[in-house]
């Protein structure tokens, strides 16, 4: 089981770092530039660019936007890999051998995705870094103003809120695609259809759970 | 020994198995034959415990499957080996890892003991140079042999094969048939094979169960199938001119 968990960490977490790093960095930059461009009133302090970037990235972009991307990348991978095992009778082979196939295939994925908050922490850091680089290099504000903005009125509870929903999303990312893969019927075409359906439902449930947690913790 | 006693299995309103009773003896290759849709695969899956009959009993050496608890069922499954139609090898594992998998899951052997057992089994199925290859890197016939090796590595009491010859050329099909038969006799396994292949029926069918529309239409040996007058059996088995001539010659020889 230990080897299976390590393999899943490699496939699901380590294998997703590249795309997460790339997306987070540029999204952070775009959020910062758009905020800067919308602040044209001289009475509004420039450090609000950093403040807004930090709040947007920590509260929403890193946990939720990244999870939707992961529903496409990791979710499709989980559904198609388990679905292919179903189609090619590998799951039946496990059952015939006396292996609890649900436990063997899905539990390691759930455990591996418990490391998902580390990915989101990286995403938060790089999003803010991307914002800082974009506005400083683009001449929208000074580095000092941006750093003042990201420090001002910081509430650690917001980070707790972000990581709470990240844990919920991690569980959704592991279980819903596994469900669609494990219980699929048919052949190769149905594997593709199951992957698409799994992505749609994983995204929908992430958005609904995001709303519920936000209402419960911040509302 | 597997005893099947009046099993019925339905899916929705469609009754697929309509009261099948038979025995499968150890050390013999038992074949289930019949047209597509006759219930062969469902019957085999009932024997494997992948489908649960609504009525009737399946008895494995005096143990009634439907009366077992989950732990006993799991323990019984460790006495079973299965060769799937498409081999069902784990894609991400090498040949050696595939064969070692049941040992890793259920035996208390040391790593070196497991390795020795895997080497013996792979040698037995004539695969000595494929240990480190992935299933995608070997031929269909080799994949079938790996599947057989994986099925027998735990020294099973019962071996089930679903269309072991499908997709293989005639020569490889005969090699696989003979290998299954030899292993059955060598390890005194109760082997049940689900097949369409008439060569298998003639070559290794020590006991043949013929299914039609969910009923057991006929049972007997490969010697008896030449003599039977059962119309459904003769229609199915001697549907080709070649087998009609073979039967004719056999009857003439006997007379």
Image: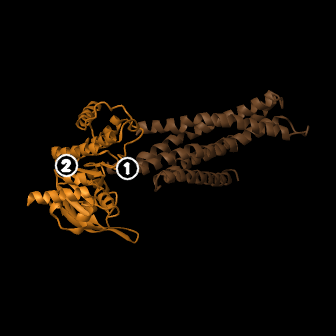
Chain colours: A brown, B orange
Judging by the rendered image, the residue that carries numbered circle 1 is: A100
Quarter of the view holding residue A60: top right
Q: Position of residue B108 (x, y in %)?
A: 27, 38
Judging by the rendered image, the residue that carries numbered circle 2 is: B189
Against B239, residue B108 (above or below) is above
Against A101, residue B113 (above or below) is above
Quarter of the view holding residue B198: bottom left
Residue A110 vs residue B76, the one in the foreground: B76
Residue B219 vs residue B108, the one in the foreground: B219
Q: Nearer the viewer, mark 1 or mark 2?
A: 2
Mark 2 Cα within 10 Å, few/some/many (few <14, many 20+)?
many
Q: What secondary structure is marked by label 1?
A: loop
Q: Position of residue B229 (x, y in %)?
A: 18, 67
Quadrant of image for the C terminus of chain B = bottom left
Q: Chain of mark 1?
A: A
Mark 1 Cα within 10 Å, few/some/many (few <14, many 20+)?
few
Q: Is residue B120 left or right of residue A82?
A: left
Q: Residue at x 25, y 32 (%)?
A: B116
Residue A102 vs residue B200, the one in the foreground: B200
Q: Residue at x 37, y 50 (%)?
A: A100
Q: What secondary structure is marked by label 2?
A: loop
Q: Chain of mark 2?
A: B
């Amino acid at each position: 089981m230990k080897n299976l968990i390590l393999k899943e960490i490699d496939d699901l977490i380590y294998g997703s770092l590249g795309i997460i790093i790339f997306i987070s960095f540029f999204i952070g930059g775009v959020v910062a530039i758009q905020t800067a461009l919308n602040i044209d009133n001289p009475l509004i302090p420039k450090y609000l660019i950093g403040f807004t970037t930090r709040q947007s990235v920590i509260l929403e972009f890193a946990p939720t936007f990244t999870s939707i991307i992961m529903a496409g990348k990791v979710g499709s991978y989980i559904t198609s890999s388990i679905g292919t095992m179903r189609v090619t009778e590998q799951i039946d082979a496990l059952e015939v051998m006396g292996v609890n196939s649900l436990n063997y295939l899905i539990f390691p994925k759930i455990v591996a995705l418990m490391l998902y908050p580390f990915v989101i922490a990286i995403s938060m850091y790089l999003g803010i870094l991307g914002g800082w680089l974009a506005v400083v290099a683009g001449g929208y504000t000074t580095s000092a103003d941006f750093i003042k903005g990201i420090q001002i009125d910081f509430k650690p509870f917001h980070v707790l809120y972000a990581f709470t929903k990240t844990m919920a999303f991690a569980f959704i990312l592991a279980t819903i695609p596994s469900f669609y893969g494990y219980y699929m019927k048919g052949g190769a075409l149905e594997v593709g259809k199951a992957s698409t359906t799994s992505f749609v439902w994983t995204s929908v449930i992430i958005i609904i759970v995001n709303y519920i947690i936000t209402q419960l913790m911040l509302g | 020994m597997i005893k099947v006693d009046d099993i019925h299995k339905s899916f929705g309103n469609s009754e697929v198995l309509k009261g099948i009773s038979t025995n499968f003896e150890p050390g013999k290759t038992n074949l289930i034959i019949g047209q597509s849709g006759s219930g062969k695969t469902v019957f085999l899956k009932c024997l494997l415990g992948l489908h649960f009959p609504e009525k009737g009993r399946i008895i494995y050496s005096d143990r009634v499957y439907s009366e077992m608890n989950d732990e006993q069922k799991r323990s019984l499954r460790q006495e079973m080996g299965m060769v799937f139609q498409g081999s069902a090898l784990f894609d991400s594992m090498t040949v050696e890892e595939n064969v070692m998998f049941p040992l890793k899951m259920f035996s208390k052997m040391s790593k070196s003991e497991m390795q020795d057992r895997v080497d013996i089994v792979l040698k037995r199925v004539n695969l000595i140079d494929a240990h480190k290859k992935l299933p995608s890197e070997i031929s269909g016939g080799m994949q079938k042999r790996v599947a057989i090796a994986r099925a027998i590595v735990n020294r099973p009491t019962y071996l089930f094969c679903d269309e072991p010859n499908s997709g293989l050329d005639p020569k490889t099909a005969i090699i696989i048939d003979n290998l299954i038969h030899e292993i059955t006799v060598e390890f005194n396994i109760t082997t049940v094979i689900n097949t369409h292949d008439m060569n298998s029926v003639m070559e290794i069918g020590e006991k043949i169960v013929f299914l039609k529309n969910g009923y057991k239409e006929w049972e007997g040996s490969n010697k008896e199938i030449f003599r039977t007058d059962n119309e459904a059996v003769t229609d199915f088995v001697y549907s080709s001119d070649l087998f009609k001539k073979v039967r004719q010659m056999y009857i003439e020889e006997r007379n």
